[in-house]
Amino acid sequence: TYSYVLGAIDGHSGAADIVEHGLRHLRHQLHDYTNGGWFPASPPPSAPRKTAYDHAFVILAAASALCAGFASADLLDEALGLAETVMI
């Protein structure tokens, strides 16, 4: 998602649609509604292992998308909140 945000900023055709798709995927398919956070794959593995590394990319994607004008403040707030409470 981050890479396509850069593409959208540079005006590459179709990049904004892919950013929106990535943000939807983070909000739905990859989101762990039971425990919070995000799974590294969709569908989640039978024994999913979530890592701070994966969550850092959610922060990167959401922050860059927000700076580029995409609606992603909700993702950024949740990811930063999780980082502040669980990963520290």
Image (spheres, rainbow, N blue to C red):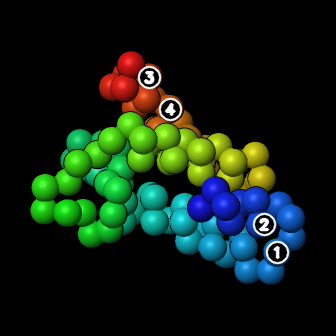
**Most foreground residue, 82 or 3:** 3
Residue of label 3 = 84
The residue where tag 1 is placed is 12
Tell me which amino acid carries mark 4. Answer: Leu
Compare marks 4 and 1 and give the one earlier in the sequence. 1
- Give the mark nearer the N terminus: 3 vs 2: 2
Q: Is residue 5 above or below residue 63?
A: below
Residue with the mark numbered 4:
80
Decide: marks 4, 3 in contact (CB < 8 A)? yes
Which residue was labeled with disc 2?
8
For badge 1, the amino acid type reads His
What amino acid type should be assigned to the residue bearing mark 2? Ala
Find residue 18 and report its horizontal and vertical position in percent. Answer: 63, 73
CA distance separating discs 2 and 1: 6 Å
Q: How far apart are labels 2 and 4 at the CA level?
A: 24 Å
Looking at the rendering, which quadrant does residue 6 occupy? bottom right
**Label 1 Cα crowd, 10 Å radius (few <14 / some 14-19 / many 20+):** few
Residue depicted at 61% across the width and 68% down the height: 20
